[in-house]
């Protein structure tokens, strides 16, 4: 479970940095680091929720694990 969360956090972080770079390049304002972290956290929680709804038992404890690691 921890490896899934680590990989997905990395993937979500890279995507968020890429998105921020594109927004800056195309004239939109930059976001604060706190806003980017919030976006990453929300993306990971949304993915975990979608896996839990799909009925995969393997990811049943993913949300609890994610919330514990954030503290």
Image (tube, rainbow, N blue to C red):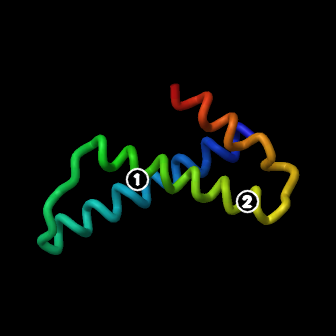
In 3D space, how far apart are the residues under numbered discs 2 and 1 (Cα atoms)? 19 Å
| Residue at 43% across, 60% down | 15
Give the image location of residue 61, x and y in percent.
77, 40
Structural crowding at the residue carrying mark 1, measured as other residues with C-alpha within 10 Å and reported as few (<14), some (14–19) or many (≥20):
some
**Which residue appears at 68% of the width and 34% of the height?**
65
Q: Which mark is residue 55?
A: none
At 38% from the left and 44% from the top, the residue drawn is 37
Left or right of 18, for residue 69: right
| x and y percentages locating residue 8 in the rendered image | 59, 51
Pointer 2: what residue?
51
Quadrant including the N terminus:
top right
Q: Secondary structure beneath disc 2? A: helix
SS for callout 1: helix
**Residue furthest right in the image:** 57
| Side of 26 where 45 appears, left or right | right
Q: What is the quadrant of residue 17 in the picture?
A: bottom left
Picture coordinates of residue 33 (x, y %)?
27, 43
Determine which residue is flagged by label 1. Answer: 39
Q: Residue 20's x, y, as percent?
A: 28, 60
Residue farthest top in this picture: 71
């Amino acid at each position: 479970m921890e490896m899934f969360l680590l990989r997905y956090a990395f993937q979500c972080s890279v995507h968020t940095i890429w998105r921020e770079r594109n927004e800056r390049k195309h004239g939109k304002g930059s976001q604060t680091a706190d806003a980017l972290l919030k976006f990453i956290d929300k993306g990971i929680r949304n993915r975990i929720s979608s896996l839990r709804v799909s009925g995969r038992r393997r990811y049943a404890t993913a949300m609890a694990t994610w919330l514990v690691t954030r503290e």
